[in-house]
Image (spheres, rainbow, N blue to C red):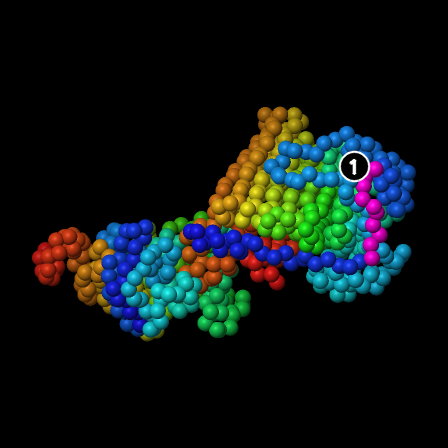
Amino acid sequence: MLHVEHLTASIGGTQILKGLDLDVGNGEVHAIMGPNGSGKSTFAHTLAGRDGYEVGGTATLDGADLLVMTPEARAAAGVFIGFQYPVEIPGVNNMYFLRTALNSVRRARGETEISAREFLAIANEAMELVQMKKDFLNRAVNAGFSGGEKKRNEILQMAVMQPRLAVLDETDSGLDIDALRVVASGVNALRGPDRSMIVITHYQRLLEYIKPDFVHVLVDGRIVESGDYTLALHLEEAGYADFVNQELNEVPGRPMSGAPT
Amino acid sequence: MSETLREIEELTEAEYEYGFSTDLDTDIAPPGLTEDTVRLISGKKNEPAWLLDWRLKAFEAWKTMEEPDWAKLEIAPIDYQALSYWAAPKMKPVLDSMDDVDPEIRDMFDKLGIPLHEQKMLSNVAIDAIVDSVSVTTTFKATLAESGVIFCSFSEAVQEHPELVREHLGSVVPVRDNYFAALNSAVFSDGSFCYIPPGVRCPMELSTYFRINSQNTGQFERTLIIADDDSHVSYLEGCTAPQRDENQLHAAVVELIAKDRAEIKYSTVQNWYPGDENGVGGIYNFVTKRGRAHTDAKISWTQVETGSAITWKYPSVILQGDRSVGEFYSVALTSKRQQADTGSKMVHIGKDTTSSIISKGISASRGQNTYRGLVKMMRSAENARNYTQCDSLLLGSECGAHTIPYIEVKNPTARVEHEASTSTVGEDQLYYCRQRGMSEEDAMSMIVNGFCRQVFDQLPMEFAVEAQRLLSISLEGSVG
């Protein structure tokens, strides 16, 4: 479904992604882990089409070339980013924002717009998923939200937008354990055969709640190791040092071989 | 970033939607301003001697005064002798009903989206329609009269209710108040008059719609609203003008009197022709708006200023009575080469008086936007309070935003708060919206509207929708 081949991205002359390869199949959940500065968030922004990056290589969604599309066209194609730092938009009602977003992608897909009443039903269902109080929809987008509320709002938006590909960028950062459970159960409820997810995270903790099908290690702009969930457990114990050293020394061979058990 | 800037520039240079002019048979005076001009205007309107004297006194005062130069505005010199001070659409002598309104005038208002046929009106709004400073019709007069509300043109009020006019005219804005107020007092041609009797809650919104049509004429309206004890009224004002290459002068005066426990809410959506992107044409808008609040009374000004080449306007409240309340909510957008120097004055005289000022300035393209406000706590203003918030939004790199607050406090128990902020529409905000599927234009318009929310929330429903649409049009270039 998502095919990424030799993806490169630089910003202000600094190369951050240095040839990233990744294939995500229908309904799969992939975790991407890696140390700070390895390019995890840049990968998310490159898929979403944020301005300011010089991008090379290939990224297609269901065969369509994402890299030539505007951010809004990518959204219409089904790309959704759960932001690490959701921005505040003062004075813009959360409900209005969400309905405008949903109707924008529907229009772009040639679908009919959703009426206010229909939307309310969709939104209420999504609200239950992230256990938010009713007044949540009437507040301004992320304005004055706590860290946990912002992340829940991202999952709420994902539930409303029903994306084809959701990229969750460090959704667990800044969450206490209760909020983490709520967010994770929301994400799990949205898993399905037609929806793939990329979960970007620093820590294994989130993956206890969102069990990925695959785990990838991103170091210095490249995926250096892929495996199943056990790879995440290993990283939790050993950290990224092995992979970082391996990258620096370009030592061939399986990085896990020398890890302590 | 530079690409975004360019797009913002395109977005903000929208076409003016109301730029058409209507071919009306107009009675117009030759250019020039002398005592004879004042006499001519007064004579045309069959005014009583006291009013002519009042005008002449104002004219004498005006001759000794000088144009104010303290505003942050660059204005080409105005030749007051080149203007015509009287223009009126020729009408049948008596208007008995809406059917008597000149069809061309009716068409003009239909084109502006303002139906003057009462049976066609959807909303609960009575309208005084003013073309070139002359009232052409007032709707729902009969309905209003049932509750004792007087709503008519100023000229009519002079004939029908001279005692009310004489008592209150100039009582809030004296003839010598300022250069433009003095000019207006000498040559004003018409405007709206409104009186709400004691204890009456006006059953519908009252509205004046101003349309400048003629060329080379100055526009001088006079509005007087009196809310007697315990009464309540909500008043709306809308303005448009044809697109012309020369600047046109508009100098209006609005006086509000809220007697004990009365409440006046005055909302303006000002969309005079702003001129083109090179600064050619556009209305010079010099307006004096002031209200006096008596004991426990409340006066609230809300303005959305998107038009005019020059805006010079400081709706004010004199908080005379104890516990009186003054409010000012403003959105001012300057795009193209527009310049606005606008804000409010709150003069606290009574005890326990409170005022708030919420100002949102948006500057785009090469627009210059200045907030200028005065909060004055007099010696008698025990425990008076003011809260002022001035937010500026900059769209682009060639525009400007300026905030000039004046605060004078003569009573140590008074409390004054002032907050100000300047921001731009963030790249990250736009990116966030676009990631959710919105076009850059929609995202921009949504963010800017959000910035103005606090003010739009103060407007009556229909006006809020209109204001939001107007702002989007001014920003989007999507002429409807």
Classify B16 as above or below B159.
Answer: below
Could you say which is closer to the camera, residue B188 or residue A182?
B188
Could you say which is closer to the camera, residue A39 or residue B156?
A39
Q: Which residue is mark 1?
A: B170
Horizontal and vertical percent position of residue A232: 20, 60
x 10%, y 60%: residue:
A252
10 Å neighbourhood of mark 1: few (<14), some, or many (≥20)? some
Let me know if residue A247 is in the magenta part.
no
Q: Is residue A146 visible?
A: yes
The majority secondary structure of the magenta stretch comes to: loop
Could you say which is closer to the camera, residue A206 or residue B279?
B279
Let me know if residue B28 is in the magenta part.
yes
Q: Is residue A1 left or right of residue B4?
A: left
Name the quadrant containing residue B221. top right
Q: How many marks?
A: 1
x 59%, y 25%: residue:
B412
x 48%, y 53%: residue:
B6
Name the quadrant containing residue B115. bottom right
* Highlighted magenta segment, given as a residue range: B25-34
Horizontal and vertical percent position of residue B324: 67, 37
